[in-house]
Image (cartoon, rainbow, N blue to C red):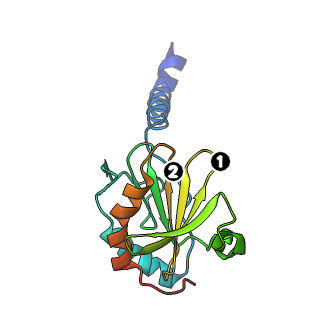
């Protein structure tokens, strides 16, 4: 009996810690995304963009993905994900895209912001800004209104990311 009592104080905190960890590790609705690693100049532009982003996109409230970063943002569930400071997509310089010969990638513009649109294998669309001093990527899940998302983001992008050539 003494052995049980002697070890019991150590057992209860460990059990409580295990229960707490299990509760914290349960799945939630938070999305996760890779945080880009741009230059310091681009990080400054992305922070300005983060401050200018709308609270709603396509009628959905802002729900930023994990890990928390000024370089990423999200709206809704399933989320529309924005990543600022991404590398230039290879298709952006592919002549087939510029000539309209790539069925999965199209160049175009929405409300004064030029985009490269790439259809993903899961039915989502990935848009990357063109002719801006930082590349900003927006992924719109299958079934969501891409045009509404791009229209809602255009004002913040024009305000925060000047026209020009990205690093």
Asked which quadrant contains residue 122, the reply is: top right
| Residue found farthest to the bottom | 164
In-front residue for pair 7/21: 21
Mark 1 falls on what kind of element? loop
Callout 2: SS = loop
Which residue of the protein is positioned furthest toward the top in this rendering? Answer: 1
Instruction: Kindly identify the residue that appears in the image at 51 percent across and 12 percent down.
Output: 1
Q: Is residue 58 above or below residue 90?
A: above
Question: Which of 115/21 is in front?
Answer: 115
85 on left or right of 44: right
What residue is shown at x 37% (from left), y 69% (from top)?
Answer: 154
Q: Position of residue 103 (x, y in %)?
A: 66, 58
Mark 1 crowdedness (10 Å alpha carbons): few <14, some 14-19, many ≥20: few
* 9 lies above or below 63: above
- At a point 34% along the width and 71% down the height, the residue shown is 156
Q: Is residue 162 above or below residue 128?
A: below
Residue marked by disc 2: 32
Tag shown at residue 121: 1
* Quadrant in the picture for residue 50: bottom left
Q: Nearer the viewer, residue 135 or 68?
A: 135
């Amino acid at each position: 009996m003494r052995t049980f009592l002697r070890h019991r104080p150590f057992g209860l905190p460990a059990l409580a810690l295990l229960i707490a960890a299990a509760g914290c590790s349960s799945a939630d609705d938070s999305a996760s995304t890779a945080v880009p690693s741009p230059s310091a100049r681009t990080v400054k532009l992305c922070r300005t963009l983060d401050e200018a982003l709308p609270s709603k996109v396509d009628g959905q409230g802002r729900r930023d993905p994990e890990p928390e970063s000024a370089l990423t943002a999200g709206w809704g569930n399933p989320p529309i994900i924005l990543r600022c400071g991404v590398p230039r997509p290879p298709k952006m310089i592919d002549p087939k895209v510029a000539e309209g010969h790539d069925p999965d990638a199209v160049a175009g513009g929405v409300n004064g912001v030029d985009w490269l649109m790439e259809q993903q294998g899961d039915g989502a669309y990935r848009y990357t800004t063109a002719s801006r001093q930082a590349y900003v990527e927006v992924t719109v899940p299958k079934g969501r209104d891409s045009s509404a998302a791009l229209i809602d983001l255009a004002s913040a992008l024009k305000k925060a990311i000047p026209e020009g050539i990205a690093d």
